Amino acid sequence: IGDPRAVEPLIAALKDDEWSARYAAAGALGKTGDPRAVEPLIAALEDGHEYVRRAASEALGKLGDPRAVEPLIAALKDKRNDVRCAAAEALGKIGDPRAVEPLIAALKDIFEDVRHAAAGALGKIGDPRAVEPLIAALKDGDEDVRLAAAKALDRLGWQPAQDENAAWYWVTK
């Protein structure tokens, strides 16, 4: 994987007939750190198999290239929750403020793993626009989402006042 000569064959493998080969290639490309992988991985976000789309999202997060932000934002609307979750996590790793509003919207996803990933990503990005939506997420029905929201608020430097929001925060902590 560390050999730059591996990148082109791995990119070619993203078009293999077998989804498992495409999945493995996407995962390996994320480990290369090579910017040549970004555009082919962006294209893989449209793959017909959810595992490939998820692996492409994860790989793009590892590469951290801002070219992937808009396509990953689009992936937050994927029909599969595991792809949406991976896209949210990747956006958090990239840390681009363009992702804040779409991640705030993802805090209302029907799947708790997506809401959890969105809260964590918002904490990593560190944009103050996320404070109010994260405070609202302290009341989420899922304990992991509440905890991710509290941790994100901590990262944002939010200090609870003596009100109902503080009570939700301290109960969560």
Image: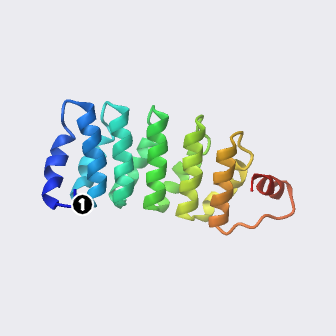
The C terminus lies in quadrant: bottom right
Q: Is residue 146 above or below residue 82?
A: below
Question: Which residue is under mark 1?
Answer: 34
Q: How is the image coloured?
A: rainbow
Q: Is residue 82 found left or right of 170 in the rendered image? A: left
Q: Is residue 80 above or below residue 2?
A: above
- At label 1, which amino acid type do we have? Asp
Residue 83 lies in quadrant: top left
Say which of 29 and 40 sits in front: 29
Query: At 58% from the left edge and 60% from the top edge, which residue is drawn?
Result: 123
Query: At 56% from the left edge and 41% from the top edge, which residue is drawn?
Result: 113
Q: Is residue 8 above or below residue 156?
A: above
Query: At 28% from the left edge and 45% from the top edge, which residue is drawn?
Result: 26
Instruction: Work out whether residue 77 can be spotted.
Output: no
Query: At 62% from the left edge and 66% from the top edge, which residue is drawn?
Result: 155
User: Can you give x and y, in whole percent of width and height, for residue 151 in the image?
Assistant: 65, 59
User: Can you give x and y, in whole percent of width and height, for residue 61 in the image?
Assistant: 39, 55
Mark 1 surroundings within 10 Å by alpha-carbon count, few (fewer than 14), some (14 through 19), many (20 or more) = some
User: Can you give x and y, in whole percent of width and height, for residue 24 in the image?
Assistant: 27, 42
Instruction: Work out whether residue 173 can be spotted.
Output: yes
